Image (cartoon, helix red, strand yellow):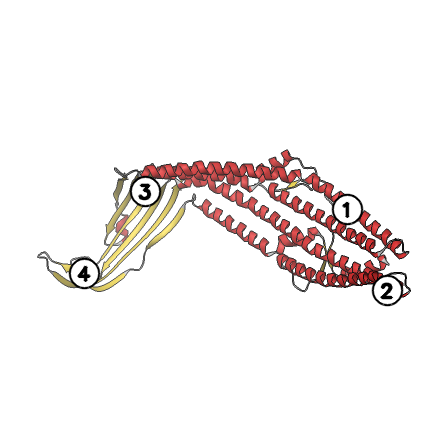
Amino acid sequence: MLIWTLAAIGAPLFAQQKYTLQDVIELAKSQSPLSRQAETRRENRYWQYRFYKSNFNPQLRLSGTLPAYTKSVSQAPLADGSFRYTQVEQSNNNLNLGLVQPLFFTGGTVSVNSSLQYFNNYLAEFPQPGEQWGGTVMNIQLTQPIFAFNSLRWDRRTEPLRYEESRRSYVEEMEFISQNAVARFFDVLDAQINLQIAEFNLANNDTIYKIEEGRYNIGTTPKDKLLQAELQLLRSRQDVTQAKINLQIARLQMRSYLGLRSSEQFELVLPEEIPPLFITVDEAMQLAKENRADFIAFERRKIEADREVAQARGQRFQTNLTAAFGLNNNGLALPDIYQNPTQQQTFALSLNVPIIDWGRNQARMQTALANKKLNDYVIAQDEVNFEQEIITQVGQFDVLLSQIEITKKSDEVANERYVVSQNRYLIGKIDITNLNIALTEKDAAKRSYVGALRSFWTSYYDLRRLTLYDFSNRRLLYIPD
């Protein structure tokens, strides 16, 4: 009877696509919308890092205004203060080619430039020349802030950390997706098992009702027992209907999460095979400190707080040094520029020093120092919280493994007890009430076993996320440089 019922329930399911827990996790990591978002964020952060790296490379720039033509009537002042209007038609073009190299160790820039200017007054009258050329054959220029905040030097400390943090954060996101996939998997599995239990109970309660009906007809059972069996049968039909709805909803939610086509039908396989694990708190803590993005973020946040202090200190004075040396010339024709050019020298030191600022600089500096102190306190608390999370997560693994063993044994015992109770009921040794108690305990034991498996796999993938380490295969989950 029991074997026939289980076969009837399982027949339509075995024709469907079977997914293990690993199958669902791989689907989530490869094609789910969340995995594609994580991939896009990783790509975005890579190109941000490439942009940062380009700040230290020399850049060849071409700038200018070409062509530039003007034709208008212009107002010109006279010596007596009056004006006269003259017609203007001219062209004024310029072109500059420069090679610029940032100096990250000083925060300045050095550049090598060459420029060319062309002017033509189309209305010029003899003996004034209409066409003139000018230009810089070569120019070397240094621009250097003094006592200023050097953003490039600080970027060299923070940006590599930020990029490495993003690489590890991507792996953490994948493990978080895996953890969510475990939750979706067990949501469907719970609904799937509940439907199997409901259909099994319906078939058996239908048989029990027919037995009670036969016994009532021959007068060996009272009517209240028959009504109890009928009520149990009606509840079983209601349970089957609700279980089908719950399974349909859970499957739709998992399809949406995994990015599966709505037409795909599948059955989930109970993940009873537990990987061999030996995890100590010290090992997990060391792995987390070496691999987790948060610990890199702690270091980065400390440097960024120091950066804000340095930036506040650098804003007290604004002093810039500009020096240039080159060769330039002019002439009526383009070749004249390159014949005996004259020296071009520039040296300038600009100052902007506040004499009385009513404590403005001091307030800015003290604010940065207070923010740094607050940041240190917050990071220290974050480190304590994270360590506590690792200790808690590792500490519960032995409990979870023990729970799986106990609930699995309880499931086996409850099933065996129900079979014995059913046989005793059929020969009239126990009544329907005791049979229903055995049935309820059997269903509860099955659900407890599945719940223990859910808790274990959720905790396992959470620990992988916290340490970026695969404890089953003993390998890192990301590839370090």
Which of disc 3 and disc 4 is earlier in sequence? 4
- Residue 391 percent coordinates (x, y): 62, 37
Give the side of residue 22 with respect to residue 165, left or right. Answer: right
- Gap between marks 4 and 2, in whole Å? 123 Å
Q: Secondary structure at mark 1?
A: helix
Numbered mark located on residue 124 in the image: 4
Up-down relation of residue 182 to residue 236 (above or below): above
Q: Nearer the viewer, residue 377 or 465?
A: 377
User: Which label is found at residue 447?
Assistant: none
The crowd level at tag 1 (other Cα within 10 Å; few <14, some 14-19, many 20+) is many
Q: Residue at x 16, y 63 (%)?
A: 86
Q: Are marks 2 and 3 in contact (CB under 8 Å)?
A: no
Question: Amino acid type of disc 2?
Answer: Glu
Q: Nearer the viewer, mark 1 or mark 3?
A: 1
Q: Residues within 10 Å of mark 4 (few under 14, many from 20)?
A: some
The x and y percentages for residue 191 are 71, 57
The residue beneath circle 3 is 141
Earlier-in-chain disc, 1 versus 3: 3
Q: Quadrant of the N terminus?
A: bottom right
- From this viewpoint, is residue 271 visible? no
Q: Amino acid at mark 4?
A: Ala
State which tag comes first along the sequence, 1 or 2. Answer: 2
User: What's under tag 1, amino acid-wise?
Assistant: Lys
Mark 2 or 3: the one toward you: 2
**Residue kind at label 3, given as amino acid type:** Gln
**Mark 3 or mark 2, which is nearer the start of the sequence?**
3
The CA span between labels 1 and 4 is 104 Å
Mark 2 lies on residue = 213
Mark 1–mark 3 Cα distance, whole angstroms, equals 79 Å
Asked if the residues shown at circle 4 and circle 2 are in contact, with their CB atoms under 8 angstroms apart, the answer is no
Q: Residue at x 48, y 46 (%)?
A: 49
